[in-house]
């Protein structure tokens, strides 16, 4: 049986699922047997080492498992609550205690079997575990109704029929869903059933790769990741499945490139054309050494008959845009057109109006195309692009819509690639003339750790601008407790009196009890009627009409607004040289890399910049994480910290393929394995560019990346 077979078989074929269970599993994204087997445990409980309650070692860390007897919330005095969960096993009882965490009471109910881990203490002659970690193993009422209410099925789901999956073994604990009423215990039983009925699985990994690292085969890996005999065996299984994840991603990225370039050639552009020389000579500043080096790399790529695929990474404000403008000059000088894609209309407009004074004096004809452009003006722009009168078209995703036809597209520039999927990048290639591949330059100011860049951009050459333009000053960053918020507003008022401007960034648009974050509209009203009442305030968020957003940004750019209160729509690319202060509210809800992006909105002119990160609570862990921004101006260093603290999702808000394919891979710990997978992928595709000699591997890629590969084939 292959992975494609697993992907085609519904989880509903398992005997313990039933109609209701299938619907609830689908709500968690588990639709097929492949989804189920790749819903990996988030941790394990080694029940062979669980200590009976009566023998819990005082003053040491330990794990016990028992049934919940009582859940009680005590309030001995104002502003203090104590949650006490009493748990019993065959040897005795213990109290698990949390202070001012009353919300955890909803996680427990009498009759549940729960594992608790923490430091063992005594209070009034009773065993006590303060602030323990815990996992609900099973409950007397869990999963009711999952198999149309069948009592027998519910018993089996709890491990009361068939082999025990909770006693005398290492127990997998799965990501579960209270909303979908799916427990870890139910998932454990379903995975056991799936592995029991599976025939031998086809292993697409070439034997020489398995032999080099002593990897388990596919079926062994699935069994050992879910039900290991030892934790070491679970780690061996994880290593094998990491190879599947990373090698698959690397092969997919490179195969997409091979498919897109099949039967196509690149466009050799002229080297150092007069247009480029005039552009560089008339800039009001000198390029930095990094900018010159990167431009040379890009020019060499564009002069080649092979299409360019380059990622340009640079710190906030490092000058990537001027390099993109120079690349545009090279394309236009060769008689070709260029397109610049940005993820938002605000950023697209920013690029257009920023590039206009640089390029238009040299005869480069520019147009702006966004989804809000309509009527006669839209038809004019489309006609101008189709006839070749437009040299550079700047816009959003509107650029790759069907009605947009280029006369001769030679260069595609994509800003903030992680905001786009592979679909959009490949779709832009289809705009080029038949038989030709445009050069592709991808820019990002989002700091990407080296290992992450190698993983997610495996098909690209990477250039980095590390230095900042001459005269750019470091941004003074200050983390504030909630009660210190007035410090930020005093700075905003002071800078406004000097004629400067400020940003205030809120994490969400509307009120949300769950996130406890201030809405941009509420902040606007609060500040307008209180501490910033003497200043001119503006409001910007994604739910405003595009024309209204553009109007607000233009007024802010002209200095008619002192303080712009906004959502993260201003995170990238917004260039207001007169802005010197940014205040980020509920700052602990952002990743460090995202906060680094936000603070890059200020200090872009001659005056120094100030960034205030206001926390919404005094929670120590969040505050300490934010203080990393006070200590360093390096985006790459911050991204590495974020990667360690918050995982891969903190680095990429949207994956390159729009999926989260790396479920087990740890970018830092698995760096050497990732490097080896890249080498294997390169070798395999150099020997066999379309994987015709490896049909099993090709089939797996089609299962996981079929839509992207299909687009690449058609481009």
Image (cartoon, rainbow, N blue to C red):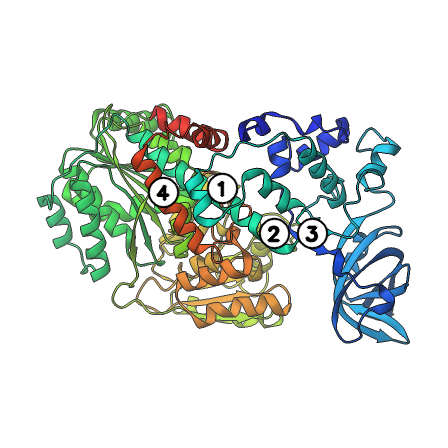
Between the C-alphas of marks 2 and 1, the distance is: 17 Å
Q: CA distance from mark 3 to mark 2?
A: 43 Å
Q: Dot 3, how many residues are within 10 Å of its Cα: few (below 14), some (14-19), or many (20+)?
A: few
182 above or below 84?
Answer: above
Answer whether residue 344 is visible to the viewer in this image.
Answer: no
For label 2, the crowd category at 10 Å Cα-Cα, with few meaning under 14, some 14 to 19 and many 20 or more, is some
* Residue farthest along the left direction in this orientation: 274
Q: Residue at x 58, y 43 (%)?
A: 221
**Earlier-in-chain disc, 1 versus 3:** 1
Q: Which mark is residue 348?
A: 4
Q: Are marks 4 and 3 in contact (CB under 8 Å)?
A: no
- The residue wearing badge 2 is 233
- Residue designated by label 3: 513
Residue at 21% of width from left, 30% of height from top? 265
Q: How many labels sit on residues?
A: 4
Residue drawn 88% across the image and 50% down it? 111
Q: CA distance from mark 1 to mark 3?
A: 40 Å
Q: Does residue 248 lie above or below 646 as drawn?
A: above
Q: Secondary structure at mark 2?
A: helix
Q: Which residue is mark 1?
A: 244
Q: Nearer the viewer, mark 4 or mark 1?
A: 1
Is residue 498 rendered to the left or right of residue 471? right
Marks 3 and 1: in contact by CB < 8 Å? no
260 or 51: nearer the viewer:
51
Q: Are marks 2 and 1 in contact (CB under 8 Å)?
A: no
């Amino acid at each position: 049986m292959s992975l494609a077979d697993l992907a085609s078989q519904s989880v509903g074929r398992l005997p313990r699922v039933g109609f209701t269970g299938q619907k609830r599993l689908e709500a968690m994204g588990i639709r097929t047997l492949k989804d189920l087997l790749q819903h990996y445990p988030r941790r394990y409980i080694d029940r062979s080492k669980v200590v009976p309650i009566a023998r819990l070692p005082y003053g040491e860390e330990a794990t016990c498992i028992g049934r919940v007897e009582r859940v009680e919330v005590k309030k001995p005095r104002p502003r203090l609550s104590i949650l006490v969960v009493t748990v019993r096993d065959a040897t005795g009882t213990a109290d698990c205690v949390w202070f001012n965490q009353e919300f955890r009471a909803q996680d427990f109910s009498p009759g549940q079997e729960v594992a608790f881990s923490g430091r063992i203490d005594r209070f009034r002659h009773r065993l006590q575990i303060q602030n323990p970690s815990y996992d609900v193993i099973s409950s007397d009422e869990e999963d009711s109704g999952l198999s149309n209410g069948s009592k027998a099925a519910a018993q089996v789901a709890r491990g009361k029929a068939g082999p025990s999956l909770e006693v005398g073994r290492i127990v997998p604990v799965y990501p579960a869903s209270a909303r979908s009423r799916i427990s870890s215990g139910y998932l454990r039983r379903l995975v056991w059933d799936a592995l029991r009925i599976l025939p031998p699985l086809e292993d697409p990994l070439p034997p020489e790769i398995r032999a080099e690292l002593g990897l388990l085969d596919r079926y062994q890996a699935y069994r050992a990741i879910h039900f290991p005999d030892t934790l070491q065996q679970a780690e061996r299984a994880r290593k094998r499945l990491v190879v599947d994840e990373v090698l698959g991603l690397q092969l997919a990225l490179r195969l997409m490139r091979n498919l897109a370039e099949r039967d196509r050639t690149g466009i050799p552009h002229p080297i150092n054309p007069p247009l480029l020389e005039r552009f560089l000579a008339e800039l009001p500043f000198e390029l930095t050494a990094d900018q010159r080096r990167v431009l040379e790399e890009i020019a060499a790529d564009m002069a080649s008959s092979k299409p360019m695929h380059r990622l340009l990474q640079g710190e906030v404000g490092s000058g990537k845009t001027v390099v993109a403008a120079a690349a545009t000059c090279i394309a236009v000088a060769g008689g070709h057109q260029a397109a610049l894609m940005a993820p938002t209309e605000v950023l697209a407009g920013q690029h257009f109006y920023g590039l206009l004074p640089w390029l238009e004096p040299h005869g480069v004809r520019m147009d702006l195309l966004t989804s809000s452009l309509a009527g006669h003006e839209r038809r004019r722009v489309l006609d101008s692009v189709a006839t070749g009168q437009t040299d550079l078209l700047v816009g959003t995703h509107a650029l790759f819509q069907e009605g947009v036809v280029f006369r001769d597209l030679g260069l595609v520039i994509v800003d903030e690639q992680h905001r786009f999927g592979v679909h959009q990048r490949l779709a832009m290639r289809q705009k080029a003339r038949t038989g030709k591949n445009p050069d592709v330059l991808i820019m990002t100011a989002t700091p990407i750790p080296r290992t992450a860049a190698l993983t997610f951009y495996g098909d690209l050459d990477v250039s980095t601008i590390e230095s900042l333009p001459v005269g750019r000053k470091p941004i003074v960053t200050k983390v504030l407790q909630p009660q210190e918020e007035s410090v930020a507003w005093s700075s905003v008022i002071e800078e406004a009196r000097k004629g400067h401007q400020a940003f205030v960034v809120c994490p969400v648009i509307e009120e949300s009890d769950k996130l406890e974050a201030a809405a941009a509209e509420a902040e606007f009203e609060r500040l307008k009627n209180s501490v910033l009442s003497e200043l001119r305030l503006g409001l910007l968020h994604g739910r405003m009409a595009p024309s209204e957003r553009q109007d607000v940004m233009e007024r802010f750019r002209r200095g008619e607004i002192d303080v712009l209160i906004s959502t993260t729509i201003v995170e990238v690319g917004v260039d207001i040289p007169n802005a010197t202060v940014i205040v980020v509210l509920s700052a602990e809800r952002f990743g460090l890399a995202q906060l680094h992006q936000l603070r890059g909105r200020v200090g872009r002119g001659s005056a120094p910049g100030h960034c205030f990160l206001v926390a919404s609570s005094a929670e120590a862990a969040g505050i300490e994480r934010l203080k990393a921004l006070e200590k360093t101006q390096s985006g790459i260093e911050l991204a590495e910290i974020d990667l360690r603290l918050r995982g891969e999702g903190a680095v990429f808000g949207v994956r390159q393929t729009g999926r989260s394919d790396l479920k087990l891979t740890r970018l830092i710990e698995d760096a050497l394995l990732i490097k080896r997978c890249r080498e294997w992928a390169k070798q395999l595709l150099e020997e066999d560019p379309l994987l015709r000699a490896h049909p099993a591997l090709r089939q797996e890629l089609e299962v996981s990346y079929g839509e992207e590969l299909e687009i690449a084939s058609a481009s």
